[in-house]
Image (cartoon, helix red, strand yellow):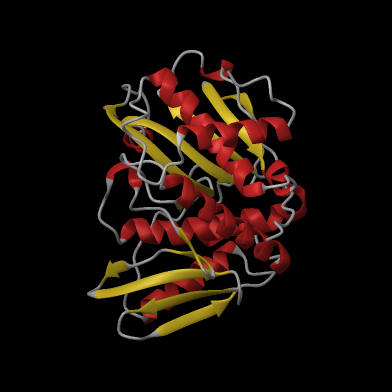
Amino acid sequence: MTLPELHLADWRPTKDTLHLYCQIVGKIRLATTAPRNHWWNVPLYVDVRGLTTRRLHHGGTTFEITIDFVDHTVVVRTADGRTESFPLSAGLAVADFDARLHAMLAELGIDVEIREEPFGVPMTTPFPRDTEHAAWDRDAIARFGRVLDWSDAVFEEFSGWFNGKTSPVHLFWHSLDLAVSRFSGRPGAPLDADAVTQEAYSREVISFGFWAGDDNVGDAAYYSYTAPEPDGLRDQPLPVGEWIEFGSGSLAILPYETVRTAPDPRTTLLAFLQSAYEAGARLAGWDTAGFESTWCPSPAQLQELHANAAATFGRAQERS
């Protein structure tokens, strides 16, 4: 499969509009699911047509909401066979999306109240008053959907190499990033932070993900970080990608464009994910051998993975 271009500047208005749509749908998911550790009850998921809430429960009914990137619609399906939808197109403001989705849910008897304001993004206008964000570039949405589908598949493969506690591969709507996380099983460091952050980092974690792009990282990119961050993490060599300073810590970053144009995008991304994991886990003292699953490549195969990526990107001498 040839991966499409996804430069932030080419679809920024649509990306911001989609982000806010996802926040509304995500908040409905939050309001209709029981709490889970690390907020695993709130994300959205990639499916064959776009993004979905999966099963939600309210008013004695099971239902799901899908943002369909193929037909460019929002679809609500209930367990008793009812289906309602409305089209997505240029000009549908966030305020209209919010009103139409709640009206559709009310007609089905499953509407819920949400906090009608964005979370964790630069946009601050409450959803019912946001008439500014109304872009919908169908081609850009289709390209984004293809990138999500491909990235989700690689993350699933990588996730299968680890037999410890692992998150699902899911999309966090507050930052619009597709993510998967591994845990050591040990408590995290105490944090002087809000309740959302405290719960997210209540256990030692190494996270991996894909950002669609924003003002902080620019164009779309893959990332990894270790929390709490062990000393010396930023000094560890990577066969592809770079460590950058991000907030109060370090972030391994691999531009999506580097992956897209690589001779073998899949192995390039896997080499980045594995090397970032090895760096964080080794310095943090994780039992890396004990966490290898039956499906994890052998040490020789992992070494070959790293070496091939390093050679491709001119870093054959960097890996110790």
Q: Residue at 74% across / 49% down in the picture?
A: 7
Judged left or right of residue 160, residue 212 is right
Which residue is most to the left? 60
- On the image, the x and y values in percent for residue 297 come to 46, 41
Quadrant location of the C terminus?
top right
Q: Quadrant of residue 138?
A: bottom right
Rendered view: 266 above or below 46: above
Rendered view: 113 above or below 242: below
Q: Quadrant of residue 222?
A: top right
Which residue is most to the bottom? 81
Residue 5 or residue 36, whichever sits in front: 5
Quadrant location of the N terminus?
bottom right
- On the image, the x and y values in percent for residue 4 come to 72, 57
Tell me if residue 216 can be seen.
no
- On the image, the x and y values in percent for residue 318 come to 65, 20
- On the image, the x and y values in percent for residue 85 come to 50, 80
Residue 313 or residue 40, whichever sits in front: 313
Q: Residue at 47% across / 13% down in the picture?
A: 231
Q: Residue at 45% across / 62% down in the picture?
A: 25
